[in-house]
Image (cartoon, rainbow, N blue to C red):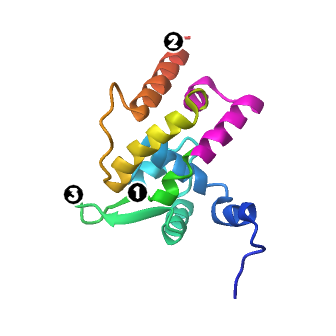
Amino acid sequence: MDERRSGCPINLTLEMLGDKWSLLVIRDMMFGNRRHFRELLTKSEEGIASNILADRLKRLVEQAVISRSDDPTHKQKAIYSLTEQGIALLPVLAQMAAWGNRYLPVTEELSIRAELLERGGPKLWAEFMEELRETHLGVKARSRRGPSVGARLQAAYEAAVAKRAGK
C-alpha cells in the first residue's frame, strides 16, 4: 500500500524531509562536514537526542539522501556521506536560509553562511556542490584558485563568532 498523500512534488518532498530534524542533519553534514554519529550528536546547535538522530540517519539512508559505510579507522564507527540526491539539496537549503535571514530574528554568526551563499548565488552553489561531491562521493573536483567555498564559509563563521566574543 502506498502511504503517500499525493503525487505533488512539494508534498512528497515534505513527506521525505519535512520533519524537524532531517534537514538539520543534512545541514550539519553539508556545512559542518560532520560525518560520524558522535559529531552529529554533540556538535548540533539544536541538541538532537541520540534516538532521534539514529532514526533520522536510518531514514535518510533508506531514502538514499545519505549513505552509510564502515569507517576503516574504527570497527564500530560508521561514516555518513551525502549522496548526489543529498548534495542537490544545497540550493533548497540556501534559499531557506536566505528567507530566514530576511524574515526571522537570526544571529550574525549563524546567518553569515546564508548571507554569503545568497550573495554568491547559483554560481557559488555549483562550486560548493562540486566540493561536496569530492568530499562525500570521491568525485575529483576541478582545480580551484584560492580557498574552497567550504573554507570561506567556515572562516566567515569563525570571524563572526570571534567578533561576538569580542563584544
Mark 1: few, some, or many residues within 10 Å (few <14, many ≥20)?
many
Pinpoint residue 158: horizontal percent, then vertical percent: 45, 24
Q: Secondary structure at mark 3?
A: loop
Pinpoint residue 11: horizontal percent, then vertical percent: 75, 64
**Amino acid under disc 3:** Thr
> Which portion, as a residue range, is magenta?
91-117
Identify the image quadrant of residue 110. top right
- Is residue 90 located in the magenta-colored stretch of the structure? no
- Identify the disc placed on residue 144: none
Pinpoint residue 78: horizontal percent, then vertical percent: 34, 62
Label 3, on which residue? Answer: 73
Q: Going by the image, does 66 lie left or right of 121? A: left
Q: Residue shown at 29%/36% (left/top)?
A: 143
Pinpoint residue 63: horizontal percent, then vertical percent: 54, 69
C-beta proximity under 8 Å, tags 3 and 1: no
Q: Going by the image, does 98 lie left or right of 165? A: right
Q: Nearer the viewer, mark 1 or mark 2?
A: 1
**Amino acid under disc 2:** Gly
